[in-house]
Amino acid sequence: MSFCFIHAADLHLDTPYEGVGEASPQVADALREASLAAFDDLVRLTLERKAAFLLLAGDIYDGAERGVRAQLRFLAGLRRLSQAGIRVFVVHGNHDPVGGWPGVREWPEGVRVFGADVQEESVVEREGVVLARVQGISYGRREVSENLAVRLRPSEGPGLKVALLHANVGGDATHAPYSPCSLDHLLSAGFDYWALGHIHRGQVLHEGRPWVVYPGSTQGRSLKPSERGPKGACVVHVQDGTVRGVDVVSVDQVRFAVLEVDVSGLADLGGLRGRLQREAEGLRAAAEGRALVVRTVVRGRGPVHADLRCAGSVDDVVRDLRDEYEGEHPFLWWESVRDETRPAIDLEAIRARDDFSAALVSQVDGYLERDGEAACFLAERVLGSAPRKVAVHAASLEAVEAASVVEEARALALDLLEEEAGACT
Amino acid sequence: MHIDGWFVDGFGVFHDYEQRGLGDRLTVFVGANEAGKSTLLAFLRWVLVGHPSRGASDHYRPLNGGRHGGRVFIRGLEGEISVERMVGPRVPRVVFPDRAEEGDEAVRRLLGGVDAGLFNSVFAFSLSELQDLESLTGEGVRDRIFSAGIAGAGRSARQAIARLEKEAAELVRPRKGGRVNDLLSRLETVERKVAEARTAAIAYPALVEAELAAAATVRSLSEHEDARRAEERRYRVLEQLWPLHQELSEILGRLDRLEPVDRFPAEPEERLATVLSKAAAATGRISELEAEVNTKSVEIKGAQTSLREDLPGISARLEGLVARLSLYEDRVASLPEARGAFGTAKEALSRSLAVLGPAWDQERVRGFDTSLPRHEELRMWASKLEGALLAVRERERAYEPAAERARQAEVERDRLRSRLEGLEPTPGEEIRSQEAALRRLRADVQELRQLETKIDNLRALAQDREQALRMAVAMAGAGVGGGLGTLLGALAAAGLVAAAALGWVAGPGWAVGVGAAAAALAAAAYLTARSRRSLGAVVHGEERGLREAAESAARALAAAAEQAEVLRARVEKDAAFLGLGPRPTFSDIEDREVPLTDARERLLAREELEARLADAEEAFRQAAAQREHETSNLREASEAEGELHEEWMRWKTRAGFDRTLGPDGVTEFLRAIREAQQALRAQEETAGRLRRLQEELELWEDQAHDLLVELGLESGLVEGSGDVLPRRIRELARLCVEDQATRDRLGRLEEELRALEAKLRAAREGADRVERERAALLAEAGVADEADFREKLSVFRLRRELESRAAELRRDLDSRVGRGPEAEELRAELATGRMEHWSREAEGARRELEHATSDREAAIRQHRDAERNRQALEESSDVAAREMELGAVRAELEQALSRWRVVSAARSLIEETLAEYSRTRQPPVLAEASAGFCRVTGGAYQRILEREDSEGFVVLDDCGGVKLPEQLSRGTLEQLYLSLRLGLAREFARRTTSVPVIMDDVLVNFDPARAQATADLLTAFAAEQQVLFFTCHPATVDLLLSADPGVRVVPLGRATMR
């Protein structure tokens, strides 16, 4: 008998969007609604595919205080699946450990939420035939350093053996090391399909027997690399008790993208705007009709650097781009333009000189060559003289290498020292 | 550069005052008070840099005439430059040695970019300005003093710091106002809102519990209210039921008093009336039916007497004859037309046979083949014969023009052949060789001329380079000069060799030129050798360049001479071939070209005629071949046409046609036979039709006759009248129809009589049933007649009415009271009839109900509030919205902080570098000034340093003590400022250009020792940079002369003022 089931994880319903600057009301509304609409699409997908069951591998919410709107929306989706006779299996993740759903008083029929202890497996049948045996285990608290995978063991009997778990396989450094486990262990555990959650970038760690799959999150929520690009769920096709293939279907509503543009060869800001618009059209073409939030990082050396360095130029570029795309549906929101361009300065040539700029470059070279010097410089000379609150927040900035900050400062200083008088008027 | 002099047209006291020949060192202008020293200083300032403020020149309006303004003469490497500034035009006029003129920008360029502020502060100052600290702390001057060498290619480090500080301050401020400060404040607000929203979200279960508790309270209060409402309703019901209870009791009493009639027939009056009515109707109906039966019996007897018994047997045959009667009459009418058609067809056949001839009878006509294949065959023959004839005609048409073209081509060939035989022979190859030689000769002569020009130019170049080399040698040292002299000697020798070569190949003119160049080189060699001792160091690079250039020029000259020799040899050879002299001119070449052109035209005419003859012969050959070809074609077509004709004759014989007939004749003959065949078929068809018509008429007449005879009637056939027989048949048919109608009517009458008799029987049975019904009704009511029946009926009805009302009252009571124990208790209470008690109890219950309702509504409101709170929280996106806002603020804050961090780091980097740079590398200006100050003060002060706050400077004394400028005496302070200006002027000269320094009596406050030291400093300074010193003190002049006797002294006085 052939059937399919849906595997999703990391819904993070109604969660905030990280690192996205102030957006227009329309965009802010769309972003707030995106994770919930993505879940609605997941339910629709499950119904359309007439899936035998739906697996949700943790982190449905960000936390108990997340608000009940999302919990009730979640409950409504589960009711629709229940009414269609589709079973749902859920485990709690690190963001929503057991007891973190105060808005849910009673689960609809056919919904099984696994606890923090090993419990009896659920058997999914259709027309008297056993399709699958599902086991799962939830997080009892937020920080689980125990390898939960070892507690799941397949039982004897017919049907596809599925394990549902929120875990960090292989120590992915971009995510917290909760429930750490190794791929080797999963391969030898005797299950047919490991339905995992926790890693937001979808990936198939192993194909065959067993399949080890991270479906990724259902909706991106920042401009971090793991949150960019298409997001969705896995449609798993099973025939005669064997997984035949896994399709990834997008359910996201808004996509995040970072556009990196080299300004070399661009004559002015008009050229930069034109280039950005062309690149953005490429992003839209690939976005499958989704709305887009785009951050632009401009790099390289060229005449555009001097234009961008003038006060307000970057803001003007962003404003122009937003005006250009205002009112479009689906929207394309220019989140920001990050100016990382550099003046056309030859450091080696400056080092060879005997002037103030050469002394400054030499000084910076000293900071960069000695371990910890750059960090000390920033701590003493920059943060040390700042107001306390500013220093605290500046110290908690996203971890950027002190060396790169010093390099950027060097570029800015040389920019000012070497610039032609009257470049910015 | 230095100021060589000036011409004052009109400026203050000066008019038409010219001063020239100022040296590039120290010049002292000495004059008494009002001699015009300050005016002169102002004049120089104004002409060179203008006034910082407009209108300042008004102070020096010409007092002694002349135009307001003048000129300053500047001497530089390129010669003397005049800078003229007059009141009126806003810009000066700068005239260069080459007479080129420029404006303001040229003056600025000459002064190394010095503007009015810098010039008046540093390079041209009076005693009072010397003491002015501010003139040295202006931005432009200060940077040059303290930061010379610190700044990068453009903006100074301090400006960079200022910009970075400004940007950092826009981002972060100590208290509030900066963007980061604002964002931090906003962050706190939003974080608070997020916390509130999260707290609200966590309270959701409590809200749900509160809602459930409120719902329970509502239910409890509703029950209490219902109980009170029921109690009030009970007593109100008792009050309402009491009148009903009383009425029921009265009705039951009346029923007891009436005669008992338990049963009575249903619908008694209607049933009695119906029975009596039905009895009367049955009696009337029986009488009517008996009368109708008698009438119908009489009609039947009348009809039976008029019937005929023999007609029904022949009715079928008669119908057949009548059906075909109209067809019979149509055939009788068409008989004459059929006979006429037969006669016409017969006549047509006779005519066709007559056309074909006596040999043709009906049998032969019928048997001749006139089928379509025969026609097709005949058409094919006609087509083939016509095609063959057309082919012959076409060949004939093709042959005639071909024969005409051949004849014309032969005539043209013969004509051209005779014309060519009449022409004289022409040597073509020789003429072409001469033409080629002539073209080559013209090009070579042209190139040779250009080469001669080139050699002239090379010769001039060699002379120029010789001059340059000679100048270089003049400046070079003796040792190098020796080498250069040797080189020039070598080049001179090479030049003589080249001159000899050119004399041989290019003529004496070239040889003279090159010889002159060689002589110049020789002279240069001599001069180089002579100046060997007096020259200093030689710039080796420059000498090498000049030597290489000279060698290059000599090589180019020799190559040109060699190329000229080759060209000349080729010219001589071609000229000899053409019969010209060895050095032909363009005129000689053009003269030689005239006869050559005539011969070439003749040659071209003959060649053209030969080409035309060849074309004509080819044309004749082709035309003759075509004529032969057409003759052959015509012959073949005629033969084919003959063979086809023979075949045609044989076919006609086989087909039975006359051999004399052509295709058209045969076609016509065939058409006549087809017409005869058609006439034959028409005769046969009309004869058959006539025969069939006659047979059918006879058949109908025989049948009609037999039928009439059978009935014993006369047929009329014997009488010979055509229309008798049909008329008889029609009469017989009418008799049959009438007889049949009578029979049909008789049947209907008999049927109607049977129906009437059945109805009569039924009416009598109905009368019997009605009588039985009446008797049963009276018996059912228990009475003997109709009167008793009606009396008993009225009693029965009254009882029914009272019983109905009593039942209605009972139902009403039952419906209001209900059933069960409570109802029984209510009935018992009702039976007591305590109306007053019930009213009191009802009022008490009503009051309690009002309280209960009020309590319940309050509880409902509380429940709704709880429900709204829960729903609001369920639908709320506050957490998401606030967190979204929080994320946006954090992102902005992060961006602003990142920028602030980079900006602050950049500022710190520049500050650190600046501090280190200042510490380790004293700016050259301060170094130079320190040396001068130390010298002037006799070592009392060692160094001048920049202040830590960068807003000025301090001095170090010989004990290392630090003093601020305001701590110095006036004289020492003036020495300090003079030293700083000289240091600045020296550094400026080192970096940019040497600008003259002009000062007005700056030594007056110096003690003798320091005045002497300053004089020494100034003369030493003036050894490298021009100084114009104005003074009114002869002692100062002596002082300066004692320092340097070579100092030039220029007196100022009345003589200079006109």
Image: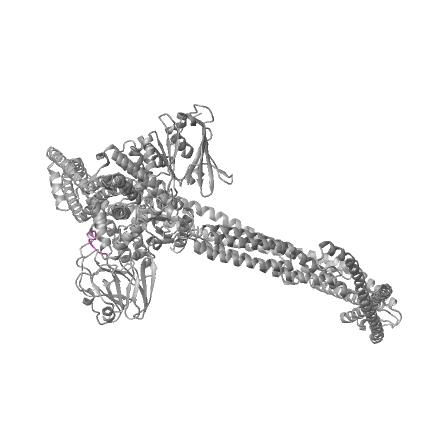
In this rendering, the answer to whether B388 lies above or below A287 is below
Give the main secondary structure of the magenta stretch: loop
Quarter holding the C terminus of chain B is top left
Say whether residue B493 is left or right of residue B610. left
**Boundaries of the magenta span:** A102-108
Place of residue B914 in the rendered image (x, y in percent of width and height, measured from the top left): 27, 46
Q: Is residue B82 magenta?
A: no
Based on the displayed image, in which of its 4 quarters is residue A244 positioned? bottom left
Is residue B67 something that shows in the picture? yes
Is residue B792 something that shows in the picture? no
Based on the displayed image, in which of its 4 quarters is residue B1008 positioned? top left
Q: Nearer the viewer, residue B93 or B906?
A: B93
Q: Nearer the viewer, residue B753 or B85?
A: B85
Q: Nearer the viewer, residue B895 or A176?
A: B895
Q: Is residue A103 magenta?
A: yes
Based on the displayed image, in which of its 4 quarters is residue B168 positioned? top left
Quarter holding the N terminus of chain B is top left
